[in-house]
Image (cartoon, helix red, strand yellow):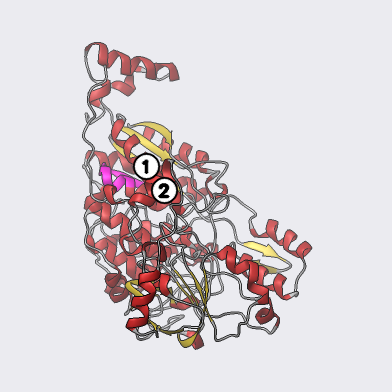
Amino acid sequence: MSGRSTAWFGAEGRSGMIHRSWMRNQGVTDEVFDGRPVIGIATTWSELVPCNAHLHRVAEAVKRGVWQSGGFPLEFPCAGLGETLLRPTAMLYRNLLAMEAEELMRANPLDGLVLLSGCDKTTPGLLMAASSVDLPAIMVTGGPMLSGRYQGRQLGSGTQVWRFEEELAAGTITQAECAVAEGAMARSPGHCMTMGTASTMACLAEALGMQLPYSATWPAVDARRDQTAQRAGQRIVELVAGDVRPSTIMTREAFEDAVRVNAAIGGSTNAVIHLTAIAGRLGVPFSLDDVDALGRDVPTLVDLEPSGRFLMEDLCYAGGLPAVMREIAPLLHLERPTVAGGTVKDAVADAACWNREVIHPFDEPMAPAGSGTAVLRGNLAPDGAVIKQSAASPALRRHRGRALVFESPEEYRAVADELDVDPSSVLVLRNNGPRGYPGMPEVANVGLPRKLLERGVRDMVRISDGRMSGTAYGTVVLHVAPEAAVGGPLALVETGDEIELDVPGRRLVLHVDDDELAARRARWRPPAASSSRGWTRLYTEHVLQADHGADLDFLVGRSGAEVPRESH
């Protein structure tokens, strides 16, 4: 077998000698240079990313599989991104990871790729890179943590943080109790075990066909996680032999299925931005209107936090994603291929459900069709905004209230407890979009004012050009486009304005007449640049709006894997 890597290791003369010679200092034998496929294992391992800190172990399992199938595995690091520690947000660096990984994939002697990810931005970042280079690739996500346990009850990562924050502010729990709960909530390696963005993107990588069946849900510490990784190592060698590339797997039909799966699992709104960015790299037509249209006839079947009761471990034991996909099989493109070697139909045909409390039947759903992510439009969001219906309060899905406007979450928090506010008020947080913050952080679901929490209020309408963690909940309108920082209508809202939210009607309307808005626009001035140097400057000068996936304008589209010029 020979392939792309032969241009390095099979070359004659000085060039080939240099490439082979320096590899030999790792103790490899002559056989690795015999034309066998070289498999790059792109890992986002980092001790600064708790969700990904176990990926070295996963990589070893992948290597076993590659060796077994006659390949030559080489692990290489890519930027580790985690929302838990990284400031201001890991989303600011998703495109940097994608750009770095793309360049490393293209510049090195690689025939195929195994993508190791975990925390939520690393999964789309690596898929974006692999889509651009379009070498044969397979994804292995690191798996969710074990379910949290505290005082005899279940705790879900992320989701319970928001709830503890509310209860702490309301005075119903103590700081000491919160400290104990922290350890009970995160008691094993892995990413969030709620249906946050990490779990959502793992499921959607499987739904797209880029992960082996059941890969998304095995807990990080389960032996079957390593077994799946080993099989992925075996499978990538076969994908290289068959020249099966991401562009042959992630077709328009695959993205349609991913949207429908996201609706069925009650997945994160962040999936919309990530799917749009991945599709943009592949040149696949995909828009916000597709998200809304494709999700309307899909009921929510999976009863998981933050929209439901259970956690990823429960979904795993109930039958995993194949069991969910079997329930919605009539809505899916069953004949499209996956990295497993067969079709979607093959992957889900024999999938059994073992717990109907966790995975509901199609005709007895947890929530009716059309309960997933909705896309809103109107004079406040001409290019669209999104809301996760299953996490919103039904009574607030049609609402009209007085706006309270804040330029940042920090400004809001500084005055939250002294606000002239009531449950009907609409909190507007702007300058949190791709350019405005920068990086579009997960700050839109700000905590409610203390005086409302003390009265038992646990939700109110919030509107932002920022994002919300997939583990969070509430009636929160997100990703308003265009964002305030580029002069979108959100920049023109003033405290006291009336805002109407109509989720069933897909409308978001600012009730201010056109002449007044024109006068406000004439007075508006753009905010100062976020940075004069480095990545942040490059990002803010080139980032697209949320409705286009917040990718960089010069990275959209496939670049290919052409071998760089010879350097020796």
Spatial CA span between label 2 and label 1: 7 Å
367 or 414: nearer the viewer: 414
53 or 481: nearer the viewer: 481
- Residue 491, percent from left and from top: 42, 70
Which residue occupies 39% across, 37% down?
Answer: 41
- Residue 464, percent from left and from top: 46, 70
134 is within the stretch colored magenta: yes
Q: Secondary structure at mark 1?
A: strand
- Residue 257, percent from left and from top: 30, 66
Three-letter amino acid code at disc 1? Val
Q: Secondary structure at mark 2?
A: strand
In which quadrant of the rendered image does the N terminus lie?
top left
Say if residue 374 shows up in the picture. Answer: no
The image shows residue 73, relative to residue 359, as above or below, that is above
In the current view of this chain or complex, which residue is farthest to the top?
Answer: 13
In this picture, residue 530 sits left or right of residue 414: left
Which residue occupies 26% across, 20% down?
Answer: 567
Kindly identify which numbered label has been placed on residue 13: none
Tell me which segment is drawn in magenta.
129-138
Kindly identify which numbered label has been placed on residue 140: 2
Q: Earlier in the sequence, mark 2 or mark 1?
A: 1
- Residue 46, percent from left and from top: 53, 41
64 is within the stretch colored magenta: no
Residue 214 position by quadrant? bottom left
In this picture, residue 272 sits left or right of residue 311: left
Q: Are marks 2 and 1 in contact (CB under 8 Å)?
A: yes
Kindly identify which numbered label has been placed on residue 114: 1
The image shows residue 26, relative to residue 230, as above or below, that is above
In which quadrant of the rendered image does the C terminus lie?
top left
Three-letter amino acid code at disc 2? Val
41 or 227: nearer the viewer: 41
Which residue occupies 41% across, 50% down?
Answer: 94
